[in-house]
Amino acid sequence: MSPRDLIHFEEVSISAHIEIRKQASPNNNSSTSAERPISTTLTMPIGRAMVISVEKNGRARMARSPVLPVCHWPFSGVDCEVTTGTAQDGRCKKASVEERGIAREVMNQTDMTHLSELRNSQSALCNGAIMTNGQTKDSNLAHGLVRKVLNNSDGNGQKKPMVSLTHLPKRPPIDIQFLDMSYSVSEGHKRGYKTILKGINGKFRSGELTAIMGPSGAGKSTLMNILAGYKTSHLSGSVLINGKDRNLRKFRKLSCYIMQDDRLLPYLTVREAMMVSANLKLGKDISVSAKRAVVEEIIETLGLLDAATTLTLNLSGGQRKRLSIALELVNNPPVMFFDEPTSGLDSSTCSQLIALLKSLARGGRTIVCTIHQPSARIFELFDNLYVLAEGQCIYQGRVNGLVPFLASLGLECPSYHNPANYVMEVACGEHGDWNSKLVTAVNNGKCNNYNQPLSQSKSTSNKNVSLDGTATSGPTDREDDLALLKTVVSTGDYTAIAMPAITAQDSLAQLNNESKQASGGAGMIPPSTERKLIPGAGTESTGASTLTASAAHTAPMTTTASTTATTLATDGNPAADATGPLLGTAVVPLPGQTAQTQTGCKATCTTSLLDSTESVSITVPKKQAGFPTSGWMQFWILLKRTMITIMRDQTLTQMRLLSHVIVGAIIGMIYYDIGNDASKIMSNAGCIFFTTMFTMFTAMMPTILTFPTEMAVFVREHLNYWYSLKSFYFAKTIADLPFQVLFTSVYVIVVYYLTSQPMDPKRVGMFVLICILTSLVAQSLGLLIGAGMSVETGVFLGPVSTIPIILFSGFFVNFDVIPSYLQWVTYVSYVRYGFEGAMVSVYGMDRAKLACTEIYCHFRSPKKFLEEMSMDNAEYWIDATALFGFFIALRVIAYFVLRWKLHSIR
Ligand SMILES: Nc1ncnc2c1ncn2[C@@H]1O[C@H](COP(=O)(O)OP(=O)(O)OP(=O)(O)O)[C@@H](O)[C@H]1O
């Protein structure tokens, strides 16, 4: 008997409620031998069997069995099947089966406690740390954290806290609505403005996964950037959050934007990156252990445990994407925007990723993605679709409402054709010029029928029905979400999530309802709406949505979702907000649906994020008006992170250190022992000049090459409200310092020693100092170039802009020779100060005459040589101060360039 198998559904199942009761050890006395029920509700796709197993460590596993060739609703009149298994004496009694689910007994003695903990912890992730039975509110609530106390009995009927886990901060659900949204960009001085979005409207609801689709250039990214708050200028129209004008600052704290390219720092491990995120996003009021718990939960839930100690550099594409999500999940943002999350991923990883997003959405989050031409299988995973063409909306509503909507206008999607492809063809004009008609239809409300909130049928389905058929308070949607998320993560079986929680009756009623609407109330289902999706492409993801393309599982729900999100509205009055719907949308019950049904749905269909009683503790603390952590804390965290990444970067650090030593040794050998030889004084000046050049270029070029990568990460993190530009910049500046000082010193000391420069400590110190200052100025210049332009431009511009600076350094041309109208340039040549300061350190300060190894040495007197170089009046400390001034000035300029860059992104 395999210890892995618990129950094996061999036949088609639709949904099942499994209740496992494990008796305590027979050795226990009766008072402590109470059964510990562990139950969960699973939703399984039609046409699929599912293997549910419990591993020895107590982890639940679900895996999809081979696809059965069932594409139709096979059990007319059967809503679900209820199966149970009861473990006795450590073994599972053969499960009783109702209807068609056949459960095979197979259970090893497994301590189910861990499973229970796991379920609860992951449930919290799915649902945004929602309070469940047995949880207690404590002071953590004030900080938005919930401590979990499992529902466990000690045998005396007393609830005892079994495990304390910290969880995600609680957040309000957020519905985003945009009205009459237009956006234009300037095309240049005389070319005027180009309108990209043309007065579009739409609404993205919490708990739903929405796809924005459209041909290339339709304005998808633009729309998402606007909604995410990244673009704020040249914009008209309004964005409403739960029915009220958006307060951008507050909104950005509760939303995140996960960009197409996963911008991660390469030299941090997954766990380290997560801890940085937790430290920055959760604030100092939350203990380190609580942060660790959050991090570990997310890492495990998103399937990153195996890669927890892997550098992000070595992660696979799917893992990178999941890490990007995990980093943002730390503070549990209720709104998540994804720009083409599936790009560059294989189809299986794509499916898993979208299923993961769907499960996150089911936790009460509002998830919006732009996506290009998804497969039918992935397409069906979305709840909602927003299609753009030429900056206008040509469809918004349920994914499975698309085909009937198009059909109602005369656009028949051919059988066995992916609707996602079809709508893209329509948007691109391959079927004629339909866009204006579609826009008009959308504006006239023709797709409103397909744009209802997600079905409340979860509450009316039999998921929570006990074996005797009575309603129970057992498994909740949260547990369901746990099971779904667990399925996705542990087995990659996303199909469970593809299954809309819908009963046959709901489905048929809905179908009829929509058919009536789509066919002008004729009550007949148009033939086109009965089409099936392509087997293997669309049907594989199954679920009720595969019954017919038009089987929208919708039922209007009350709009109390908004009642908790009062802090986002500009002038939100929590008291007022909590008392009524904020969305201002009239709710019209579907035929056959009573108001009572809807009320019931409110309590159970939606996540408890929508429970207004919880909204009190959800409110973001006032002290978080700015970033979650103080400026100094941000600086400290970023400083540590930057130093770790610099140290681990072999190119930037280890190779650089090595190259400084090697080149220093080579230069030392070439100019060996010439420092006190008057006959080789020009060669020695060349050595000093080369030293200045080397320290300059080795400081500037790596910065030009690496800063754009850092900057990309910075932009993502800053725009997602992790920390301020000031903290980042200050930390970057300070973290760079010790490394730059070390590299330069190593090189200079090697050269200085081998070339026998004067060993007076004062001169040595001055020489090293001036070289360090030169390198810091060069590094700052590299930072400025890296901040302002791309790597390609920077790599060209860096050296090119340095050449004139070198020419005016005083080595190639004496200052006296330079024409007077160009002499001012020598003052802005920082190399001049570096070279001059180095020369003064070696030959200035009344150095004694040099030794002469030839018959005649013209420059035995160092002073005379300095006169020859037009440096006899040079003051070392003026040079050093000038370099320091350059350093500060360039850093300040680079800071403002970064600010401008951030501003220009918007
Ligand atoms: N700054 C700009 N100046 C001029 N045109 C711009 C600017 N930004 C965007 N556009 C134009 O706006 C249109 C929409 O761009 P957007 O990036 O939103 O398209 P998209 O639908 O996301 O396309 P894709 O799928 O190819 O990424 C494009 O035609 C683009 O050229």
Image: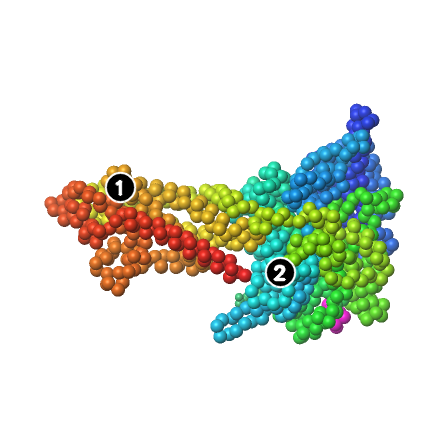
Q: Which residue is mark 1?
A: 763
Please tell me whether mark 1 sits on a helix, a strand or a loop.
helix
Residue at the outermost left position: 855
Quadrant position of residue 414: bottom right
Q: Quadrant of the N terminus?
A: top right
Q: Mark 2 touching mark 1, by CB under 8 A?
A: no
Q: Which residue is mark 2?
A: 227
**Residue 527, horizontal then vertical, whole percent:** 80, 68
Q: Which residues fall within the magenta stretch?
A: 406-414
**Left or right of 899, for residue 53:** right
Q: Residue at x 62, y 70 (%)?
A: 198
Please tell me whether mark 2 sits on a helix, a strand or a loop.
helix
Principal SS element in the magenta part? loop
User: Which three-letter amino acid code belongs to the residue tagged 2?
Assistant: Leu
Q: Residue at x 20, y 42 (%)?
A: 847
Label 2: how many Cα within 10 Å (few below 14, some 14–19, many 20+) = many
Picture layout, residue 179 above or below residue 347: below
Between 706 and 498, which is closer to the camera in this rendering? 706
